[in-house]
Amino acid sequence: KHQNPLSMVASSTLITQSTPYLQSLLSQSDKHSLPESLKILLSNSRALYSEHVANGLLSSTEQWWFLQHMLRNSCLMLLNHAAGGAGSHATTIQSRFMKILEIGSFTGCASLLMARESFVDSITLVDVDHQAISLAESAFRQEGIHDKFHYFVGPAKHHLDKLVKGQAQFHFIFIDANKQQYDAYYEKALLLLIDNGTMIVDNVLWRGQVWDDNFRDETTEKMRTFVKKVMDDERVESMLMPIGDGMYSVRKLPVTRKDQEHIQHDESVQERQMTDT
């Protein structure tokens, strides 16, 4: 943990240059060309949503490659845990098993890249934009991967509540939606994420304004509070990566028997208090 979690992201350029992992990852992204289907979807997205492009709200190629890298890493980690730590390799995967939730899918560029992985079983998309979802669905059909997708169009909180109520579970969750609602999305996502599952949260540096005290607008303040909360959250292991507009990589820690006893004790105390009142 860091006493001042924002000091570590004061200069994303310097951190990128001084971190071998990031240097390696970004150099790899330069060597790999995007799939043709993704290039077409990206072109259509830019044409229909020029304002989003101008405002930097369309994720960069580096962010997509990082997302794909983290997805593969999460897959290996989950297989390793399932095998009791014996270790597994992506080449040994015989079936589709990973379930992914994307909160704020937009036109589905990130989803298209993730869905191409053979171990991905299904991806649930949540977005308020009907046109964006329609564009995504068309691209998925052209790619021949439309059977992997489920769609929820409308306010994210409403659909997340339905998923929680239905006890849905996901191995990997990507959040890139309404920034002022990140805290609420994060809490719902933790309920939906399996133990040792991975959550990626985009735009957490919010154009660099999070670390700059001169910015005091509502969105920046909420994002600043969110960054600190995740950094200090003992339910997870987190790492803030200065890629694009800042991406949080979060792993949900398993609840130990001792933790579960504490939770049950607290719930029992709350129930007695409610009965007494």
Image (spheres, rainbow, N blue to C red):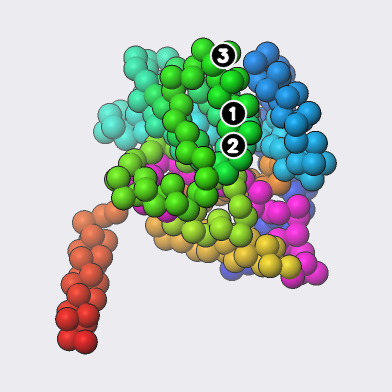
**Secondary element at image label 3:** helix
Q: What kind of residue is marked 3?
A: Glu
Q: Residues within 10 Å of mark 3 (few under 14, many from 20)?
A: some
Marks 2 & 1, CB-CB < 8 Å contact: yes
Q: Is residue 79 left or right of residue 260?
A: right
**Secondary element at image label 2:** helix
Q: Disc 3 designates what residue?
A: 143
Does the image show residue 272?
A: yes
Q: For residue 65, what is the image quadrant?
A: top right
Q: Which mark is residue 130?
A: 2
- First-in-chain label (3 vs 1): 1
Give residue 70's position: percent from left, percent from top: 53, 34
Which tag is nearer the camera, tag 3 or tag 1? 1
- First-in-chain label (2 vs 3): 2
Residue 7 belongs to magenta span = no
Q: Is residue 40 left or right of residue 105?
A: right
Q: Residue at x 42, y 15 (%)?
A: 91
Quarter of the image with the C terminus is bottom left
Q: Is residue 272 above or below residue 30?
A: below
Q: Disc 1 designates what residue?
A: 134
Magenta-highlighted residues: 188-216
